[in-house]
Image: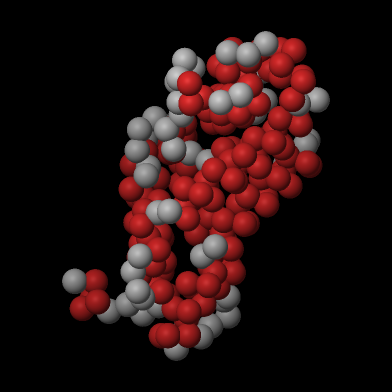
Amino acid sequence: MARPTKHSPERGGARIRLLEAARDVIRAKGFAATSVDDICGAADVTKGAFFHHFGSKDALGVAVAEFWTETTTQFFAAAPYHEPADALRRVLAYVAFRKAIVTGDLAAFTCLVGTMAQEVYASAPAIRDACGRSIFGHAATLEADIETARRDRGISGDWTAASLARHTQAVLQGAFVLAKAGNDPQLARESLDHLDRYIRHLFHVTEEETQ
C-alpha cells in the first residue's frame, strides 16, 4: 500500500491527503504526540482545510481508523493467502503472509489501529471503538477458514474459531509492541513463527504434512 508522493496527480483531494498523512505520522509518532500541524504539514494542506473536513483531532482519529479499515480490507482481500484449497493451509498462509510483510521501517508495518487503541482506550472512547471495529472485524475474516479446518480435521476442544481468530490478532499486536520495544522487526517475525507452530500443534499437523 505505497503512499503517493506529495506532488503526484494521483494523490487525491485534501481529505484523502489528510487521512494518508495521519496514517503515516501517527504510526511513526503515536496519536498523542501527533499534532494537527504535523498532519497538515505532511499532507501539504492548510489548517483551515483540516477543520473543514474534521471538527477536531479526535474526529480525525475516528476517520483515520475507518480509513485504515477500508484500505487494509481491500489489501488483505487481494492477498495470496486465500489461494490454497485446504482451509488450514489458508490459515497458515495468512500467518506466513503477515510475517512476509514485516519489512522496512517499524512505522511501515505496524498497525495504526493497534497503536491508537493502546493510547486512547480510556481517554477517547470513540476512537477506541473505531479501532476495535477494525481489529475485531479483521479477525472475523479468519473465522470461516478456522471453523472449516476444525470440521475437516475433527478437532474438538474448549475453544472456538472466533477465539483463535482473535488470538492471531493478539499475537500480531504483541509482536508489533516487541518490535518497537527492541527496535527490531525480527522480534515480530519470531512471534509469528511461534504462532505458526501453535496452530499446527492445535490442529495436530504431522511432520509429514510439513514437508
Can you say whether 23 is above or below 45 in the image?
below
- For the residue pair 90 and 26, the one nearer the viewer reads as 90
Image quadrant in which you'd find residue 85: bottom left
Image quadrant in which you'd find residue 86: bottom left
Q: Residue furthest front?
A: 9
Residue 37: x percent and y percent? 66, 13
Indicate how the structure is coloured in the image.
secondary structure
Q: Is residue 70 left or right of residue 7?
A: right
Image quadrant in which you'd find residue 201: bottom left
The residue under the point 54% across, 43% down is 71
Q: Is residue 17 left or right of residue 195?
A: right
Residue 34 in view, yes or no: no
Residue 94: x percent and y percent? 40, 59
Residue 52: x percent and y percent? 77, 20
Quick one: quadrant of the C terminus? bottom left
Can you say whether 25 is above or below 104 in the image?
above
The residue under the point 67% across, 18% down is 35
The residue under the point 21% across, 78% down is 208
Can you say whether 33 is above or below 169 in the image?
above
Q: Total marks drawn? A: 0
Residue 1: x percent and y percent? 44, 38
Can you say whether 49 is above or below 76 in the image?
above
The residue under the point 58% across, 68% down is 163
Residue 66 in view, yes or no: yes
